[in-house]
Image (tube, rainbow, N blue to C red):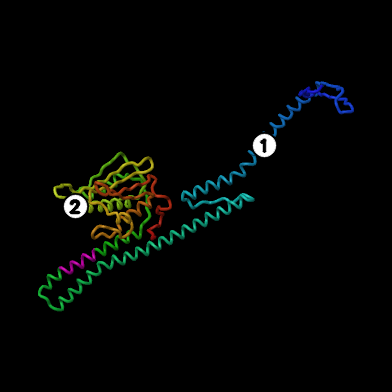
Amino acid sequence: APGEEPSARFGTWRRVLSLRGPDGAAVASVVVEGNDPSMRDLARDLDALILVALAFATLLAVMLALLVAPPLTRPLARLAADAERIALGERDIDVRTDAAGELGSLQRAFARMARELTDAEKRVRRAERLAAWRDIARQMAHEIKNPLTPIRMAVEMLRKARARDLPDFGELFEEETKVVLDEVERLRRLVEDFSRFARAPRPRPEALRVEEVAQRVVDLHAGDETPVTLLRDGDAGEIRADRDQLTQVLVNLVANACHAARERSVSPGETAAPQVRVRTRPLGPDAVRVEVEDNGPGIAPEVMERLFEPYVTNKRGGTGLGLAVAHRIVTEHGGSLSADTGAWGTRFTVDLPRAGPPPSAQATQGDEGRLG
């Protein structure tokens, strides 16, 4: 039947026979069509079987993935964790190299990289320490040379006066020996501060309250011409720190603040008196803060940039080591020491972790100090 669409039902079949004449035109057509129900049932069974096979194959693939993936991904996860720890600054990491094949090669390459990074950082720190000590030695020689000049001049003056038998030798003797004694005292302070800076004993932490240490330092200045006031902004609570070293930090900061406050240049008509304030406060659950403020003239920007370096000072007669010692102590406690100058004066800020210094910085039995 020309133009008739064949049946789309599975199991239905159709045959079309056409009789054509000599000119190729269809003369007659015979259509034979049949329908076998068993073929439809077979098709439905095949469809169900295919669906079951697909579901089983999917389940098998998931099970294989769960069994095969962990052994492959676990070493990669460990490598990622080790890389993150190294990025955060940890260096004492034991990188496992137990995988086989390409994963094992990757592990070994990563372990070698970690060791090389640790060695390189040690070399850099050693070079930095040597450079720092060279600079400190140069500064130390300069600081020692300064008082030696007036001492030599005073001695030469006395020798000449003695040789000429001047009548006012006694008065001259008193003046020049005072110069010598003053410069010798300056040398003594310089050597003492340098010894304290160089030894840098490791902290021996104990549980203490910051307010108690601050109160003790404030009490040392009771009756001074520069009043020192303690302010408590909340309960700072307990921390672990070396009591003597923390006291030394606050003593240095308060002494500098008192000196700066006395240097305040008061304009005509202004009645501001020198003041120093010590403020303690909690800094969240993991840290505390101590601030030492003065109403002095502030710190020049060129000095502020190098404030915590050895022998940097704008204080007459100062050695420039007090703030360097304080900065080193705070740093070894895992904290930070900073300074800024505002409208009221200069403020030093000490932030300390409650947990105390890291284990690598703490003193062990038999430690007496160290250099570098």
Q: Viewed as shown, does residue 204 lie left or right of 108?
A: left
Which quadrant of the rendered structure holds the C terminus? Answer: bottom left
Q: Is residue 315 left or right of residue 43?
A: left
Q: Position of residue 194 (x, y in %)?
A: 31, 61
Q: Which residue lies furthest to the bottom in this view?
A: 163
Quadrant assignment for the N terminus: top right
The x, y position of residue 178, in whole percent, is 18, 66
Drawn side of residue 173 relative to residue 128, left or right: left
In which quarter of the view is residue 164 placed?
bottom left
Q: Residue at x 59, y 51 (%)?
A: 106
Q: Which residue is drawn at 31% across and 67% down?
A: 141
Three-letter amino acid code of the residue under disc 1: Ala
Checking the image for residue 265, the label placed there is 2
Around disc 1, counting alpha carbons within 10 Å, would you say few (fewer than 14), some (14 to 19), or many (20 or more)? few
- 178 inside magenta stretch: yes
Q: Is mark 2 on a helix, strand or loop?
A: loop
At label 2, the amino acid type is Ser
- Residue 327 visible in rendering: yes
Range covered by the magenta-colored residues? 175-185
Q: Is the magenta stretch mostly helix, strand or loop?
A: helix
The residue that mark 1 highlights is 61
Query: Where 12 falls versus 266 (above or below)?
Result: above
Distance, label 1 to label 2, CA atoms, is 83 Å
Picture coordinates of residue 138 (x, y %)?
34, 66
Q: Would you place residue 280 above or below residue 57 in this image?
A: below
